Image (spheres, helix red, strand yellow):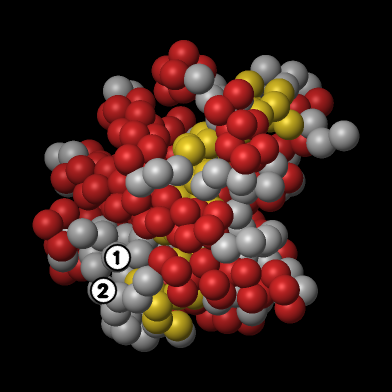
Amino acid sequence: MTPLTLSPEVAQARATGAPIVALESTIITHGFPYPQNIDMARQVETDIRDGGAVPATIAVLDGTLHVGLTDDQLGALAQARDVAKVSRADMAACMARGATGATTVAATMIAARAAGIEVFATGGIGGVHRGAETSFDISADLQELAQTAVTVVAAGAKAILDLPKTFEVLETLGVPVIAVGQDSLPAFWSRTSPLPAPLRMDSAAQIAAAHRIRAALGIPGGQLVANPIPASAEIPAQTMAPVIAQALADAQAQGVTAKAVTPFLLQRIYELTDGASLSANIALVRNNARLGAEIACSLSETAK
Ligand code: PSU
Ligand code: MN
């Protein structure tokens, strides 16, 4: 038996083959401050519903892996303190201890697949950190994309990372990286980067078709859909570059390592941009949720 608890709404959608979009919870507990985190979480669920799909936010609450949260559960998680950030390595341990844990991209993919959900929308995936040649800090998200068959919609990888190395690793792992509607890879807060996109698709239907074909061929792993932030919300790369440099210098000066790196940098960038990074982050997550819903609708129209 799979140790998952589906919300009634998600269980019903699974039973009828209705479209579902998974959502992660680390972005709520470690990616945004309160109360912007709960506003974002609710807004994104609404966007998915408006797109004709059912949202399934995933988290470990008191040892139970929930797929689909009630509004009360979402509200409590957004305000909870000392929530663990759980990935492939530690999700089961968190459940065994009866603890509460927010799922990263990797852990959310594992839970989504176990629940039969094929699409997941988020902000940005983890990747290869700058200086990884000495720190070896490479997110478990990349390995997960190589082995778990979920299509992940993100705005690329966060520009705090080493983007060329991140995409090199994805290429090595055989993960399809699909830019939506443009020939270059997006860079989270900015629409474009100097990096050419390995693949480009211009419709949700094509992305859904590729997902199906990979499954039919027996290719393990997911797809990374790199969806550029809306033009109205983007922060130019030149504006972000010094801010990112400052945040990275602060992290190094304070000796921040391992799991704490990504949350520290996001918080620092939020402070350094007087909240502008946060507004951009909300806009890109919403944009990814809308595309995720379209892909899920397209998948549910095609027979499995
Ligand atoms: N993107 C965001 N905010 C976040 C994250 C990504 O905009 O909070 C989280 C995701 O949960 C991702 C994790 O899986 O950061 C990566 O952490 P790490 O670098 O420690 O693997
Ligand atoms: Mn890491």
Q: Is residue 149 left or right of residue 46?
A: right
Which label number is shown at residue 228? 1
Residue at image point 53% right, 36% down: 56
Element under label 2? loop
Q: Earlier in the sequence, mark 1 or mark 2?
A: 2
Q: From the viewer's perspective, is the residue at label 1 or at label 2 nearer?
A: 1
Do tag 1 and tag 2 residues touch (Cβ < 8 Å)? Answer: yes
Residue at image point 78% right, 22% down: 97
Q: Amino acid at mark 1?
A: Pro
Q: Which residue is mark 2?
A: 192
Residue at image point 75% right, 27% down: 95
**139 vs 219, nearest the viewer:** 219
**262 vs 101, nearest the viewer:** 101
The relative height of residue 178 versus residue 57 in the rendered view (above or below) is below
The relative height of residue 58 versus residue 112 in the rendered view (above or below) is above
The relative height of residue 194 versus residue 34 in the rendered view (above or below) is below
Neighbour tally class for label 2: few under 14, some 14-19, many 20 plus, Cα within 10 Å: many
Residue at image point 31% right, 46% down: 286
